[in-house]
Amino acid sequence: MPAKRTAPSAMPTLLSGGNPQIAKGDGDAPVQAYIAAMPDWKQPMGARLDALIGQAVPGVHKAVKWNSPMYALAAGEGWFLSFHCFTRYIKVAFFRGAALQPMPPEPSKSADTRYLHIHEGAGLDEAQFLDWVCQAAALPGEHM
C-alpha cells in the first residue's frame, strides 16, 4: 500500500485589514499561530508584544478568541488585553484602560476600554507598554 500523502499546511486566511483568521483556542499554541500569520512588519511586532506581556506577567494565560490574541492573569479571571491587525496598524486593547495612568491614547465606544495603535515604523515605547501591562493585569479582567 503506498504511503499516505499529506497536504502541506496552508497559511491561515487573512481577513479584512490583514487580520489572521485563527481558530479559537486556549494556550500559547493558538497565539503563536496567530503571530506567525501576521502579515509583513506586524509579525515581528506581534512577537515583541507577546514577549513583553509574558515578561510583565509571568505565566500569563493566553487564548485566541474573535481572531485576536487575548491575555488574562489566569484562566477564568477575565481578560486584561488583546491585540488585532488592521490595514495600517496593530490595535492593542486595554479592557480597563481608562483606569491606567497615563491612559492609552485612543478612546473606545466603551468607557472602560482604551487603545494603543502601533503603526509601521513608529516604534513602541516598551517601558510605557510594560507599565500599562502591569497596571492592566492588576485590575479586574473583562469576562467575555
Image: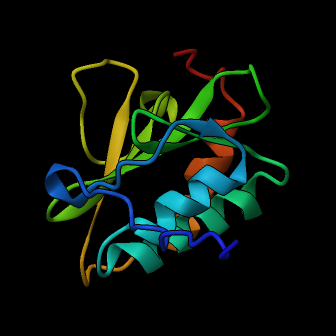
In the rendered view, tell whether residue 27 sits above or below residue 7: above
Residue 78, quarter of picture: top right
Residue 10 percent coordinates (x, y): 41, 67
Q: Could you say where residue 99 lies in the image, as x and y percent from the top left?
A: 50, 29
Q: Which sits in the foreground, 99 or 7?
A: 7
List the single residue furthest toward the front: 1
> Does residue 55 lie above or below 99 as drawn?
below
Q: Residue at x 15, y 61 (%)?
A: 87
- Is any atom of residue 114 visible in this view? yes
Give the residue at x 37% y 59%: 12
The quadrant of the image that shows the N terminus is bottom right
Q: What colouring method underlies this structural image? A: rainbow
Indicate whether 54 appears above or below 61. Answer: below
> Left or right: 29 with respect to 144?
right
Q: Where in the figure is residue 105, as x and y percent of width and height?
A: 29, 48
* Residue at (15, 50) in percent of width and height: 16
Give the mark count: 0
Q: Position of residue 49 (x, y in %)?
A: 54, 65
The residue lying furthest to the bottom in this view is: 121
Whether residue 101 can be seen here: no
Residue at the far right: name it. Answer: 59
**Quadrant in which residue 47 is drawn:** bottom right
Q: Quadrant of residue 5?
A: bottom right
34 or 113: nearer the eye? 34
Residue 91 is left or right of residue 81, and the answer is left
131 lies left or right of 144: right
Closest to the observer, 58 or 1:
1
